Amino acid sequence: MAKRPTLLLLVRHGLTPTTGKVLPGRAKGLHLSDEGVAQAERAAERLAELGKVSGVYCSPLERTRETAAPIGRALKHRVRTDAGLLECDFGRWTGARLDRLMKRPEWSAVQRTPSTFRFPGGESFTEMQTRIVSTLDALRERHPGGVVVCVSHADPIKAAVAHAMGTHLDLFQRIVIGPCSVTALSYHGHTPLVLTVNSIGGSLRELRPS
């Protein structure tokens, strides 16, 4: 067991031109908006207060790589991609407008009983949660006692928080993860502590393991 806790900092990517309008999923070619770029720079400044980190990882999609780039520069750390941090695979719903999806009868299951739902031709929420939790477990085992930054997407981060809190997946939609917010999970051994969720301002200095 590591003498010091391992700190995972989960960062959602910044705003894109379609945030809140469509379900982009894993479609390629979606970049940060100007506001999203500014958000990523501010997140990098906040994370730089932590000093040295053990690793910076991101999902392979453009919007997460563009968010992670200034973070890597601020922390003087090479950013590595990890497919385990990818957005949920929305299958045939990828790219659909949210206002249209909300009218579908299946939308109730997405919001109220997500543990029962699989996106047509894509991933289930349960599979997504298993994937993100397994990925975070592997990263913290790779960097015991360190600080690891992981740039991902809203739904995987919400699922990771729900798992760490021992909250049923059917309640994970009640967790809010805003663009470029920081969520901190601390592990001593295999026991997680949720230190902060959806932090979008202020100092992160107190999160560094002592």
Image: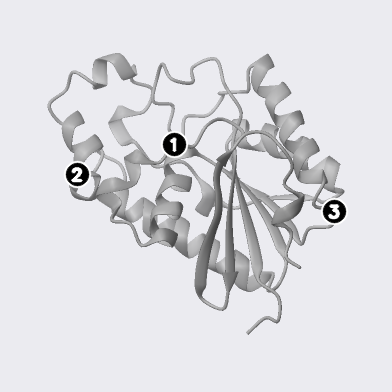
Going by the numbered disc 1, the residue's amino acid type is Val
The image quarter in which residue 46 lies: top right
State the mark number for residue 131: none
Which is nearer the N-term, disc 3 or disc 2?
A: 3
**Mark 1 Cα shell of 10 Å, populated few (<14), some (14-19), many (≥20):** some
Which is nearer the N-term, disc 2 or disc 1?
A: 2
Going by the numbered disc 2, the residue's amino acid type is Thr
State the mark number for residue 176: 1
Q: Which residue is mark 3?
A: 51
Please say whether residue 171 is visible from this viewpoint.
Answer: yes
Residue at image location 49% in from the left, 17% down from the top: 18
Please say whether residue 124 is visible from this viewpoint.
Answer: no
133 to the left or right of 40: left
Going by the numbered disc 3, the residue's amino acid type is Gly
Q: Which residue is mark 2?
A: 113
Q: Is 129 drawn above or below residue 191 in the view shown?
A: above
Residue at image location 18% in from the left, 18% down from the top: 103
Give coordinates of residue 9: x percent, y percent: 63, 52
CA gap, disc 2 and disc 1: 17 Å
130 to the left or right of 182: left
Residue at image location 37% in from the left, 51% down from the top: 128
Query: Which secondary structure lies at badge 3?
Result: loop
Colour convention of the picture:
one colour
156 and 60: which one is in front?
156
CA gap, disc 1 and disc 3: 27 Å
Residue at image location 76% in from the left, 68% down from the top: 210
Give coordinates of residue 87: x percent, y percent: 46, 41
CA gap, disc 3 and disc 2: 41 Å
Quadrant holding the N terminus: bottom right
